[in-house]
Image (cartoon, coloured by chain):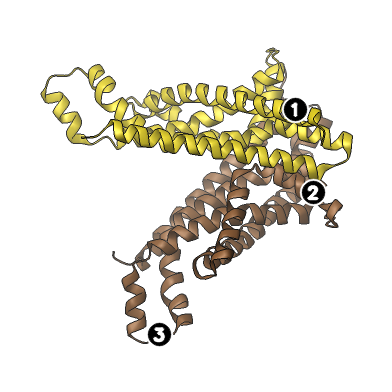
Chain colours: A brown, B yellow
Amino acid sequence: MSIDFSVVWQQLPQILSAFWNTIWIWIVATILAVLLGFVVAGLRRYGPLWLNLLLRLYVEVIRGTPFLIQLFLLYFGGPFIGLSLEPIPAGLLGMTVYGSAYFSEIFRAGFAAIPPGHVEAAECVGLSRGQIVRRILVPEMTMLVLPQLVNMAIILMKETAILSIITVPELTLVVGAIGSQQYAFVEAMTMLALFYWALVEISDWLGRLAEKKLSKFRFAV
Amino acid sequence: MSTRLFELMLWAAGKTVLLSAISIAIGLAIGLLVCAAKLSPRRLLSIPATVYVSLFRGVPLLVQLLLIYNLLPVLGILVPSEVAAIAGLSLCTAAYQAENLRGGFNSVPRGLIEAADMVGMSPWQQLRRIRAPIAFRLTLPALVNEMILILKASSLISVVGVIELTRMAQNLSASTFRPLLFYSVAGAIYLVICWLVAGGGSLAERLMRTGSSR
């Protein structure tokens, strides 16, 4: 058994570009998933009953099936219904849909946790419905659900590795390929694992920092 | 889809359930050890346990599986891919289960432990009669949740060459050229299994609640 880590460093430009792909796909998909999840949660709460039931089915199906199956369905099944996507758009779309179901459940719990008295008080002082959403509901809920949002964003960071299976050129795919070409797969994967570990720990730390900074806006219950 | 192909899918679903169940059980055993080490006042035990939990929760499961699958032969350990897959899933779920158990043990009311001290129970008796049963009851929902997560995550072991539900769907859609059908059926089977586990979990919770009527 011989372990030689130097081979990995010779491919640095390729690795950096894959790193960039992992990061931007993660950030863009997370933002889109948060927005979509918010819309789903809002429609479920304020929309008609049939829409609520339909969206509940959507959330249950997405949360009850593996991300990999969803990706395969989108990437390999999509062309049969006229949806032919390149790997990166397919990965972005898949991740957005997948994340939105989880985020919508977080927002749903957040909506439910806001004391009704706050909304009633806002109505009493004559705020319009839009103002209540913008000034009361959204800020209060954001504070309530921030820890779970950060947690889910970190889970999505790790899920980006799965995109390698549908050939999105992100870190796992590129580092794995380099490892295979150089007959140094274990070395490459070890470095990759350590790298993800660092990335997750840093994101976790940043998330906690943000929570601490924002906690002064938290309302007293 | 012919009944023969559907039978193949069901057989593969059985394998998914079997491999997930084995991994959850082994993961629970390792998780208990890691949890005990993490709660230990000895830093020689608690620091490695903390690193273990952080590492296995911080690295994507896919990367862990690829690493373990390729590392074992380098170390001279030649095992079937199923064993490597179970090892990967168990080591990963152990880290999550250790954290769940730690939460459970930390939530046992202090007063109960003090009361047990007062009536002269030994630490072992306290663990067996008071702390473990309460912690188990408190962590049951998290355990059920972890079962569902592992059932879904087990789709990743298709990548290391284990024929389970996802791999079977992959093979059948490649040979029949009908990916929409086979991935939908696979998704529906996963959904039904997850619902069954969730239903079983809430049933167990309800039974335990009536069992603990005070």
Three-letter amino acid code at disc 2?
Tyr
SS type, badge 2: helix
Which residue does the numbered mark 1 point to in the structure image?
Answer: B7
- The Cα atoms of the two marked residues, 2 and 3, are separated by 47 Å
Residue contact at pointers 2 and 1, CB within 8 angstroms? no
Categorize mark 3 by other alpha carbons within 10 Å: few (<14), some (14-19), many (20+): some
Give residue A159's position: percent from left, percent from top. Answer: 64, 45
The number of numbered badges drawn on the structure is 3
- Quadrant where the image shows the C terminus of chain A: bottom left
* Secondary element type, mark 1: helix
Q: Observer-nearest residue: A53 or B19?
A: A53
Local crowd at mark 2 within 10 Å, few (<14), some, or many (≥20)? many
Q: Position of residue B185 (x, y in %)?
A: 73, 40
Q: Mark on residue A127?
A: 3
Out of B60 and A65, give the one closest to the viewer: A65
Q: Looking at the picture, which amino acid does disc 1 mark? A: Glu
Residue on which disc 2 sits: A75
Whether residue B111 is situated above or below residue A38 in the rendered picture? above
Describe residue A9's horizontal placement relative to residue B56 as left or right: right
